[in-house]
């Protein structure tokens, strides 16, 4: 769009804007169009049309705009709306006199109506003559006079083929109250009011404006100066305002993006709206205003009895009535006690901002005195405190620690932040701010945590502040920045005098090592953290939880298991135990104990009943999806991915994004959902300088999607960053990152068999030494291909069967299907067609159960190419020397059909050869016979003569047919 289209985005109504543009473009053909823009009060109907009419495309296209608006006070005047339109006619004055309809003359004379309607019709034809486009825009249509509505209806019914776009804006609530519900407004209407017939004219397009969504808010912010608005911040704006554009726009204009990363309890109201609410309070009876102010201090929702007591009102009913009439409060009896509620959080914010500091302090102090709950008393005391208070800060810190122990990270962050504000000691204040940031991250509020870092800028640089910045750099997926900050922090700290800070730095180094997937470094830092930290503290718990993964990445599985068994003897299973469940589940998944892993990982996902860290939850959900993938529960895996992706986007934790999208990309590709697979690949992308735990799943996802399409060069390209990674950390340890078989298999399929052999040997040796069964099975199918390529079919058969035996007791249907597919494909190429057909049929059945449509189709093509039916009936032998017969597609052999389908779908000879696992010369030979039989001379001719199977093949491989 042109640069000055920003108005449409600023309006936040991109989809509705596009609907109007589409109608305008349709008018170019000479046929009129009618748009009904419908929405409640404040939904931005007028703003939408104004922004639309300002766009370059519209100003170039539209010659004339005639605009009118209904008004309640003008309704008694006949033809007032039409008079507004005609008064804007270029070069003329109004030609219709508007006058009130007397009781004896209702102004519904058919002759007069026809005269005005014909006049309006004449003006439309004059202004919408060939080469000219006219827009008629009537705002607040429901407030228009009946005579004008009828005259407009008369004209639009007779307008004929002209370039006319009519836009009627309707307030749906006012219309419903006035006219009933015709369609959306009703059926009980007066047949001659004009309004109901206008909005139901044939061909009318209704454009509905509801509350803005988070996506709408993001589009409004796009292009604004300063840092971008996050998805979670946009959602906060919507929840705060109810998505009302009249409130959203001024808030975005008046406040920086960082404000919307703050706590929901402290979000602001627009300045003009605060003034408006203040005026409403002044007009209310004193007791009504007092009750509203007291309710604002108590929160968005409060007990009526408590608010009445705090306000000191004597007539609660009258006070509630006045607040309700002003639209500031409503009453709810749906709970165990009667409640007062503000219609929206922004209303409460406006009332609260209207109170001066002195009034707020007085009300919070009074609220603390009447509260029975200790936590509520503490919150009001903190809100009333404007100056440092060591005793109150200590109480808040204790409360924050209590919340943290239960995994209530949001409330913990609030308490830590308040404790930092009130603590008079500078060094302690810094420590509390660091803890607050840490709790914000635990709550999945990374944008808020980053905004809170600004408060640390007022302190001199310290190991503590460097460590928390390093922590955020890890979660943002910035390894170089994290390395520099954590190194600086560790170098500056003295563990002998400040063990708490040192153990916290070690905790961050543990996470940094995990993100680098460096087992030895992880174990080293975990040991330091456990020695320095107090037993049961977060650094000690996290070190214990992650240490097992480091040991596993080094192949020290027995020690890893012992590390987790140690945690089983802890006296309590609090929220910190979530980390143990996640770490143990990930380890067991890598050890092929998939069902155990699934249960443990599912237990590490917080619910509304069992709270926990969102960071740990995202790790758990990423590996839970992989466990479900291995088990064949792909629908469950996709549901986990969907939920986790929403949580990740809300939290802003980039470190886990590629892991979450990995499963989504692979499953959708296997099912032939290529657009969805590409979507996950795009959203899961990781830069080359990312952490290995980001790059590995992204490269694997790319490779697996490419392999599903039989794009083996693409597999090699996708995995080259992994090949080039520094070794020694654990990325090659069996079970953790299953990339080796994909890479080696691709080398074989592109003819680089010798390279595949050399690459495979050390990985086979390591898998055998570890006794890792699924890795041995995955590598075996590549080894079988290599042996078959050397002509040693007996060895290949034994290797394939050995791989299947490794999987016998493992619940991994997809892994088994892959081995069978490779076995069948290899032996079909070697001429062992019946043996191949048996394996391919079994593989196809497994893929079918999983819903892996792409591989079901590949198995079917292989079976056709084998010339052997699944029942064992022999077809024509490969390479039969009979002369080609002239005929149609049905005259092709099964092998020729497979080649024809692939080439017609757009594959090169080399790609078709790789797909069928035959030589390029074999494909060329078959093409010669195919061309002769089908009487074609080119690949495009083949595509035309063999369209059905070509389309099927192209769809299953994610390719487009040649044009």
Image: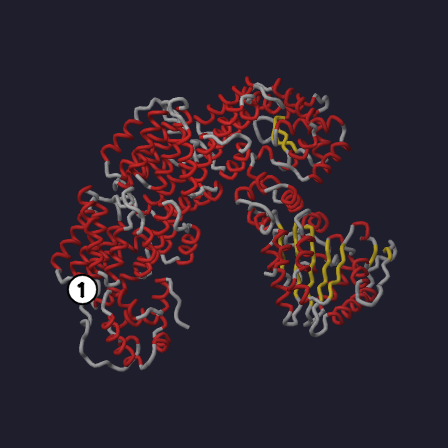
- Residue bearing mark 1: 872
Report the residue at 37% width, 41% height from top.
515
Residue 763 percent across, percent down from the top left: 21, 48
Q: Quadrant of residue 475?
A: top left
Where residue 523 appears, as percent x and y from the top left, is 30, 34
Q: In which quadrant is the C terminus drawn?
A: bottom left
Q: Residue furthest front?
A: 492
Frontmost residue, 606 versus 751: 751
Question: Which image quadrant is residue 710 in?
Answer: bottom left
Task: Please name the residue shown 81% across and 58% down the image.
Answer: 80
Residue for point 24% across, 57% down: 821
**Disc 1 element:** loop
Residue 792 percent location from the top left of the image:
12, 60
Q: Is residue 459 left or right of residue 348?
A: left
Q: Position of residue 73 (x, y in %)?
A: 81, 50
**Quarter-of-image position of residue 52:** bottom right
Q: Is residue 660 above or below residue 156?
A: above
Label 1, residues with CA under 10 Å away: few <14, some 14-19, many ≥20: few
Residue closest to the eye, 72 or 766: 766
749 vs 39: above or below: below
> Which image quadrant: the N terminus?
bottom right
Report whether 75 appears left or right of 890. right
654 or 89: which is nearer to us? 654
Give the vertical position of 613 relative to 748 (above or below).
above
């Amino acid at each position: 769009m042109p640069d000055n289209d920003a108005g449409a985005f600023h309006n936040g109504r991109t989809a509705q804007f596009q609907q109007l543009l589409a109608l305008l473009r349709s008018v170019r053909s000479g046929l009129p169009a009618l748009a009904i823009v419908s929405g409640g009060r404040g939904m931005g109907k007028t703003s939408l049309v104004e922004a639309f009419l300002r766009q370059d495309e519209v100003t170039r296209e539209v010659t004339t705009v005639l605009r009118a608006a209904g008004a309640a006070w003008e309704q008694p005047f006949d033809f007032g709306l039409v008079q507004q339109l005609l008064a804007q006619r270029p070069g003329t004055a109004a030609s219709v006199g508007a006058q009130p309809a007397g009781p004896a003359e209702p102004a519904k004379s058919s002759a007069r109506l026809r005269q005005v309607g014909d006049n309006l019709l004449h003006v439309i034809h004059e202004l919408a003559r060939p080469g000219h486009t006219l827009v008629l825009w009537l705002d607040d249509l429901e407030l228009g006079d009946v005579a004008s509505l009828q005259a407009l209806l008369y004209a639009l019914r007779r307008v004929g083929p002209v370039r006319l776009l009519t836009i009627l804006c309707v307030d749906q609530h006012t219309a419903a109250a006035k006219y009933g519900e015709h369609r959306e407004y009703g059926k009980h209407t007066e047949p001659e009011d004009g309004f109901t017939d206008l909005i139901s004219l044939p061909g009318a397009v209704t454009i509905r404006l509801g509350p803005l969504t988070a996506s709408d808010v993001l589009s409004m912010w796009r292009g604004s100066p300063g840092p971008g608005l996050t998805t979670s911040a946009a959602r906060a704006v919507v929840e705060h305002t109810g998505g009302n554009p009249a409130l959203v726009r001024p808030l975005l204009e008046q406040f920086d993006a960082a404000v919307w990363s703050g706590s929901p309890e402290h979000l602001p109201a627009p300045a003009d709206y605060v003034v408006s609410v203040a005026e409403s309070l002044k007009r209310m009876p004193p007791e009504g205003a007092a009750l509203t102010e007291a309710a604002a201090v108590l929160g968005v929702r409060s007990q009526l009895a408590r608010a009445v007591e705090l306000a000191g009102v004597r007539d609660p009913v009258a006070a509630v009535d006045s607040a309700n009439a002003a639209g500031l409060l409503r009453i709810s009896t749906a709970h165990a006690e009667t409640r007062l509620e503000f219609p929206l959080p922004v209303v409460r914010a406006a009332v609260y901002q209207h109170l001066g500091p002195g009034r707020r302090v007085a009300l919070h102090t009074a609220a603390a005195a009447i509260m029975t709950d200790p936590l509520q008393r503490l919150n009001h005391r903190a809100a009333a405190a404007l100056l440092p208070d060591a005793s109150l800060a200590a109480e808040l810190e204790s409360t924050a620690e209590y919340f943290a122990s239960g995994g209530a990270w949001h409330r913990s962050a609030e308490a830590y932040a308040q404790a930092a504000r009130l603590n008079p000691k500078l060094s302690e204040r810094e420590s509390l701010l660091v803890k607050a940031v840490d709790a914000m991250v635990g709550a999945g509020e990374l944008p808020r945590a980053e905004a809170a870092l600004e408060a640390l800028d007022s302190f001199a640089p310290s190991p503590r502040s460097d460590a928390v910045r390093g922590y955020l750099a890890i979660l943002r997926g910035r390894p170089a920045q994290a390395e520099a900050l954590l190194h600086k922090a560790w170098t500056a700290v003295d563990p002998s005098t400040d063990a708490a800070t040192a153990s916290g730095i070690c905790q961050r180094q543990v996470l940094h090592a995990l993100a680098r997937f460096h087992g030895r470094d992880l174990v080293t830092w975990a040991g330091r953290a456990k020695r320095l930290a107090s037993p049961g503290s977060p650094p000690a718990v996290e070190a214990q939880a992650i240490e097992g993964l480091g040991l596993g990445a080094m192949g020290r599985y027995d020690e890893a298991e012992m590390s987790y068994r140690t945690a089983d003897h802890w006296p309590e299973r609090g929220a910190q135990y979530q980390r143990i469940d996640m770490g143990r589940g990930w380890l067991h998944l890598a050890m092929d104990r998939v069902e155990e892993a699934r249960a443990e990982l599912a237990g590490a996902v917080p619910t509304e009943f069992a709270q926990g860290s969102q960071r740990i939850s995202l790790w758990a959900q990423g590996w839970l999806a992989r466990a479900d993938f291995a088990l064949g529960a792909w629908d469950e895996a996709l549901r986990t991915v969907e939920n986790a992706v929403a949580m990740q986007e809300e939290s802003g934790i980039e470190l886990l994004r590629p892991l979450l999208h990995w499963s989504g990309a692979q499953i959708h590709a296997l099912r032939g959902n290529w657009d969805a697979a590409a979507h996950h690949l795009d959203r899961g992308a990781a830069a080359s300088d990312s952490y290995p735990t980001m790059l590995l799943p992204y490269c694997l996802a790319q490779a697996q999607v490419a392999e599903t399409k039989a794009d083996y060069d693409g597999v090699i390209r996708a995995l080259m960053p992994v090949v080039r990674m520094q070794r020694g950390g654990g990325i090659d340890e069996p079970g953790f990152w299953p990339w080796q078989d994909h890479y080696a298999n691709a080398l074989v399929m592109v003819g680089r068999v010798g390279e595949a052999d050399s690459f495979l040997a050390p990985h086979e040796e390591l898998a055998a030494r570890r006794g890792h069964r699924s890795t041995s099975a995955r590598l075996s199918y590549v080894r079988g291909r290599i042996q078959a390529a050397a002509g040693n079919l007996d060895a290949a058969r034994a290797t394939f069967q050995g791989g299947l035996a490794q999987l016998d007791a493992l619940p991994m249907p997809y892994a088994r299907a892959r081995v069978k597919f490779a076995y069948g494909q290899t032996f079909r190429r070697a001429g062992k067609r019946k043996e191949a057909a048996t394996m391919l049929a079994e593989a196809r059945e497994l893929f079918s159960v999983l819903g892996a449509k792409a591989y079901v189709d590949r198995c079917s093509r292989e079976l056709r190419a084998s010339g052997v039916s699944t029942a064992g009936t022999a077809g024509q032998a490969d390479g039969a020397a009979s002369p080609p017969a002239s005929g149609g597609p049905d005259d092709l052999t099964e092998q020729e059909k497979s080649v024809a389908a692939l080439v017609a779908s757009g594959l090169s000879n080399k790609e078709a050869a790789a797909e069928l696992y035959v030589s390029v010369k074999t494909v060329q030979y078959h093409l010669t016979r195919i061309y002769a039989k089908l009487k074609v001379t080119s690949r495009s001719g083949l595509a035309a003569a063999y369209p059905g199977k070509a389309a099927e093949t192209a769809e299953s491989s994610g390719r487009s047919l040649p044009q």
